[in-house]
Amino acid sequence: MRLDKLLADSGFGTRSVVRKKVLHGKVTVNGAVIRDASCKVAPGDEVTCYGEPVEVLSGKTYYYLLLDKPDEVLTAMEDPRLPCVGELIESRYKNRGVSPVGRLDYHTTGLLLLTNDGELSHRLTSPSYNVPKTYRVSWTGGPLTGKDVAKASEGITLTDTAAPEHLKPCEIILESEDTARLILREGKTHEVRRIMAHFGKEVVSLRRISLGSLSLDESSLPGDIRDLTKDEISALHNDVGILH
Ligand code: URA
């Protein structure tokens, strides 16, 4: 791999920015300052930029990040106006194609997976893979009834847009008069808020706590971010039938 591509992919700046760094003698390969950005490097070579080691990887490397998305953050890598999740992750991940799996609303908090594993991302978000997503919701407007819960479990039809939308069955586990856990197997836009509105409730807070076999840590706080463990990655692959 070319030295400038390695440095750009590793988050040291655009190709033209890293070429200047190389030219200015800020980069070493195997202990020697290299000023030719087209120089080839391979796994086993020791590369540094401003003295910081740069890992030379072979082939595509996959990254899996678990972000506890805070309130008032957009599920996007970049936005000209609003804070977005892309600002919460290190730039080396962005350069390697890491992006959010599905979307949480601006005001929804909780589990957001980010990865550059396109097949996993596709399968986790496609309704045909039936991956359960659990949300903890609180609302105003009075308690949900047993009848509401039963209707949701059969699959309601939303009529809040021009064309009626039939939803997959949704499991509602009541926790109190104004809190519940909802388990969905698809990810239609604003689905939980619209289900609650269908029953005359207004959502006060919405937090995703699990996606397939992956759950937020008990102690997780909005803004926390960590790499998935090997076991969590295998379990997610297993959830959607990706076998290694
Ligand atoms: N349903 C919603 O209404 N909002 C979300 O962010 C996720 C599911």
Image (cartoon, rainbow, N blue to C red):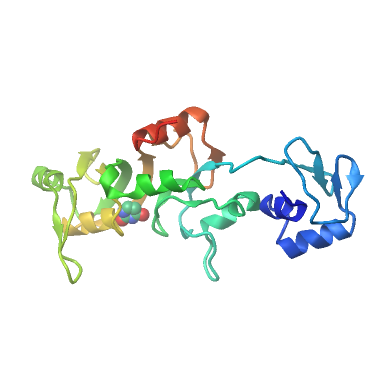
Residue 122 percent across, percent down from the top left: 39, 49
Point out residue 207 in the picture as x, y percentages from the top left corner.
Answer: 37, 47
What residue lies at 47% left-to-right and 60% top-to-bottom? Answer: 74
Q: Is residue 224 left or right of residue 242?
A: right
Residue sitting nearer the eye, 175 or 192: 192
Residue 53 on image: x %, y %: 78, 41
Horizontal side of 200 relative to 46 (left or right) equals: left
230, above or below 127, in the image: above
Residue 180 seen in the figure: no
Residue 193 lies, in percent from the top left, at 27, 57
Q: Quadrant of the C terminus?
A: top left
Classify residue 21 by image quadrant.
bottom right
- The single residue placed furthest to the left in the displayed view is 147
* Residue drawn at 24 percent across, 46 percent down: 178
**Image position of 76 (left or right of 150):** right
Whether residue 220 is visible to the viewer of this picture, yes or no, is yes
Q: Residue at x 75, y 55 (%)?
A: 4
The image quarter in which residue 158 lies:
bottom left
Q: Is residue 216 above or below residue 3?
A: above
Q: Quadrant of ligand 1?
A: bottom left
Give the camera-side residue of 3 and 150: 3
Q: Nearer the viewer, residue 197 or 24?
A: 24
Q: Residue at x 48, y 34 (%)?
A: 219
Disc tally is 0
